[in-house]
Amino acid sequence: MSMNRREFMQVLAVASAAGFALNSRHALSAGNARNFYDLPSFGNVSLLHFTDCHAQLQPIYFREPNVNIGLGESLNRPPHLVGERLLKSFGIRPGTIDAHAFTSLDFDKAARTYGKVGGFAHLSTLVKKIRASRPGALLLDGGDTWQGSATALWTKGQDMVDACKLLGVDVMTGHWEFTLGAERVQQIIDNDFKGKLDFVAQNIKTNDFGDPVFPHYVIRPINGIPVAIIGQAFPYTPIANPRHMIPDWSFGIQDDHMQKVVGEARAKGAQVVVVLSHNGMDVDLKMAARVSGIDAIMGGHTHDGIPAPSIVKNPGGQTLVTNAGSNGKFLGVLDLDVKGGKVTGFKYKLLPVFANLIEPDAEMAALIKKVRAPYEAKLAEKLAVTEGTLYRRGNFNGTFDQLILDALMEVKGADAAFSPGFRWGTSLLSGQTITLEHLMDQTAITYPQTTLTEMTGATIKDIMEDVCDNLFNPDPYKQQGGDMVRVGGIGYTCDLRQGMGKRINNMMLKGKPLDPNKKYKVAGWAPVAEGATGEPVWDVVAGYLRDKKVITPRKLNLPKLIGIKGNDGIA
Amino acid sequence: MDQLRRAFLKSTGMAGVVVVAIGSGLLKSGEVLAATWNKLAFTSSNLADAMKNANYGGATESKDIVITVPDIAENGASVPVEVTSNIPGTTSIAIFVEKNITPLAADFEFSNDAVPYIYTFIKMGQTSQVRIAVRAGGKAYTLSKEVKVTIGGCGG
């Protein structure tokens, strides 16, 4: 269902009269809706930032997580706050349009009220509006831009490359971009981006001599003030994604090198130093405490939409850390006041992109229509209707993940199933038709093969412990930023007080304890090893959906958590 | 330039680098290395024995050892380890991987006032402390850093 703005305002008025919890002063009248995006300018240097759009050119629904647990130093601090705890921490009133943007509270109902989010045509209008009052403002793209949709997969990222150029992106870094293969990445940078868009990364070098693969940073004048943008690509790309797609490059966090690059940029006259990061927010926070001389780290990867910056002290002063959500849902606006060669003040706003509140940009809308045209009929195929809300985000499982697990186990005849803890993937409201496009939003990767493997109970536990440590290792530098592997068919407890190898216990399969020595058939997808074969996951799940026609609300297989008391990362 | 260097090395093989180092007197020659191969140390199956047998027993912690290793290994079969010893009079640097079946991975001896710096690749079977030991002025020093080895996948 899509409404024009007038219809939307009428719905809001009716909803309000009917006693829906619509307290937002912005949402209650058409006049105020126009003001929603009026952001008074501040200072003299502005940076606009989006990240992890995952190739969503069209407006979509996106449910934020209700489980995002932080432990140790990360306990109860951003980004590990969800639901009402997040609202309270940032002073957002419940029941408002902002509360809907930043939390999963009452998601299905609120999403029907406020409509879809994101979309490049709407984002484009917003970027133009914000830029109009901020001379020379740069637009930064934190990466995970060329992957996440059917059209991005089928055009090898070309749809997003063209859309980003039209949007006016100035500087970007990457992660999932690399799963198109090193050659394709360099082809885009050497041709499409040449002279138009800088792809930067200080932490990618060649395996053999440690030579830089990309420029580490770029210095651009904003309003006459030299500003350095340093790139920080996802440090664990060769581990979290297939190594063989980027065989000659080495990544890593490399904060010693970051410190050198900051010094080099300052020596070349940069008055402002900003890191465009794909570290994930916990890594950003640690890096901000260890590296001096960075004014702001504008980050992504962990898909955290955080309303206000975290201010981190370090030996050189302080560094702002912002993270700007995902799926084109937000545009971050950082305004800095630079005087005498130094940042003396700042304002930050993470603007939610509500498609109903913004007129789509005609030129971008035309481009999107053109790139989608050859695929439109295929994408629109109706596979099934979902009775419950389908979403992915959450540390341990999401309803769409459960649907994939259910499909894998049934189609493959498996005892259990694993599905990766990806944080991308759009949401569907109850009663919505699942199209092939929606399914591709959850699965469109360059290594989509499904697998059926015999594993002992001991191996299953080892895998689960390994992934769990990537999420909950007390040192953020040893985390990889995804969520726990989704597990179908096996119940378990997860003890958050324990370390590696001791968290996963009481594993049960079909009412019996998992036998460490017995072999089980485990289905999965997205193998990182080279040479995997197997039917693509979208074909397996599409077949299942066509067969079922109606998808009943999923029963989430969730572990029983131990040591969660007092944690504001779970609602 | 870089491409030329890369092509040159591919055609001649990486061994060329080692030959140059020995030729310039920075490392002891192959003959000497063979003569001092410490079988006992390289086959010791726990850290304490390996350190003792390699003549680093009773080493004291030193922050003057600078270790650069990845936080998470991209490939456990080939983990880059870079070490500089800022301890005056350094004569050797050894690498121990605590959780490997035989912890001693390498032992480098320096002569002729060579700068005590090494860059090499080691194998790691699982997440472990990588412990560096240094001998300088007849004393042993040590420092360690953890490197995580993971099965991968499932990120982002």
Image (spheres, grey):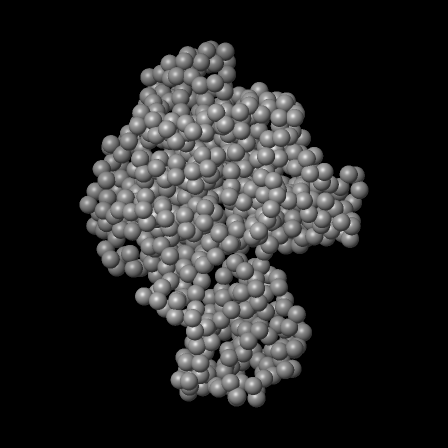
Q: Which residue is drawn at 43% across and 65% down?
A: A208
Q: Give the farthest residue toward the left.
A: A224
- Horizontal and vertical percent for residue A211? 38, 62
Q: Residue at x 71, y 40 (%)?
A: A414
- Horizontal and vertical percent for residue A333? 34, 37
- When the figure is inspected, residue A310 is found, relative to residue A265, above or below; the finding is above
Q: In which quarter of the image is the C terminus of chain A?
A: top right
- When the figure is inspected, residue A454 is found, relative to residue A209, above or below; the finding is above
For the image, the number of numbered tags is: 0
Q: Which residue is drawn at 43% across and 76% down?
A: B17
Question: On the picture, is A292 further left or further right than B121?
Answer: left
Question: On the picture, is B61 further left or further right than A330?
Answer: right
Identify the image quadrant of residue A434: top right
- Horizontal and vertical percent for residue A470? 57, 50
Asked if one can make out residue B5 in the rendered structure from this viewpoint, the answer is: yes
- Horizontal and vertical percent for residue B16? 43, 77
Judge by depth and name the residue closer to the eye, A525 or A40: A525
Q: Give the farthest residue toward the right.
A: A512
Asked if one can make out residue A82 in the rendered structure from this viewpoint, the answer is: no
- When the figure is inspected, residue A96 is found, relative to residue A75, above or below; the finding is above
Q: Residue at x 61, y 33 (%)?
A: A541
Identify the image quadrant of residue A494: top right
Judge by depth and name the residue closer to the eye, A338 or A428: A428
Judge by depth and name the residue closer to the eye, A168 or A467: A168
